[in-house]
Image: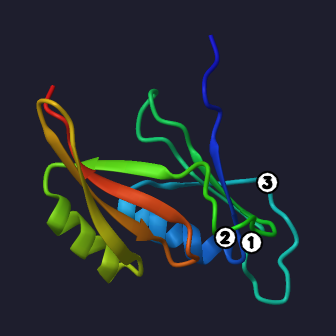
Amino acid sequence: MISIEKITFACNSPDRLATFWERALERDRVPLPAEPPDETDDPDHVLLAAPDDRSPPLLFKRLPKGSTEDIPIHLDLATEDRAATVKRLEELGASAVETKRERFTDRTEEWTVMEDPEGNGFCVCDRAPR
C-alpha cells in the first residue's frame, strides 16, 4: 500500500504561507530541527501537523516555484458552507478566482477556485453527502 507522506509547497516565504494554511485549516506547527536563520529571520521549512491519522502533514519549503499556468496538483477543500469558507479564506489573504459548476446525471457540483497568498491554486467545494 502506498500512502502520502506529506504535501510540499514550493514557496518564497514558508513562514508567511504556512501561517495562511495554519489558520485556514486550523492546524498546528510541528517543530523542525533548528537551522540557521537567514537575513529575514524567515525559516526555510515550516511543517504543519496532520489533524488525524488519515491526513498528511503540510511542508512549506523555500524553493523556486514551477509554472503557474499548469498546476497538476492542488488541494480540494470540502466544507459544509462554501460561501462562508471562501469569505473566511479571503479574510486570511486568499483570492477567489472563479466559481465553477458542472452537471452530472444525478447532481450538480459547484466549487470555487482560489489562490493562496503566493498564487498556489486550490478549490473549495461543498462536502459530498455521505
Which residue is labeled 1 in the image? Answer: 43
Question: Dot 1, how many residues are within 10 Å of its Cα: few (below 14), some (14-19), or many (20+)?
Answer: some
First in sequence, mark 2 or 1: give its number: 2
| Residue 51 rendering spot, x and y as whole percentages | 41, 41
Mark 2 lies on residue = 14
| Residue type, label 2 | Pro
Q: Secondary structure at mark 2?
A: helix
Kindly report the distance in space between the C-alpha atoms of the residues bearing marks 3 and 1: 11 Å
Q: Tell me which residue sits at (20%, 42%) in the image.
A: 127
Q: Nearer the viewer, mark 3 or mark 1?
A: 1
Question: Can you say whether 74 is above or below 93 in the image?
Answer: above
> In the image, is 38 to the left or to the right of 94?
right
Circle 3 is placed at which residue position?
33
Task: Check disc 1 and give the amino acid type.
Answer: Pro
Earlier residue among tags 3 and 1: 3
Q: Nearer the viewer, mark 3 or mark 2?
A: 2
Residue 84, percent across and down?
Answer: 16, 67
Closer to the camera: disc 2 or disc 1?
2
Image quarter of the C terminus:
top left
Residue 99: which numbered mark, if any? none
Disc 3 element:
loop
Q: Quadrant of residue 67?
A: bottom right
Residue lying at 74% horizontally and 72% vertically, measured from the top left = 43
| Residue under the image location 38 percent in, 75 percent down | 97
Instruction: Residue 13 in the image: state x and y as whole percent.
Output: 68, 77
Q: Are marks 3 and 2 in contact (CB under 8 Å)?
A: no
Q: Which of the image's four quarters has the N terminus?
A: top right
The residue furthest top is 1
* Front one among 117 and 58: 117
Relative to 9, does residue 18 appear above or below in the rendering? below
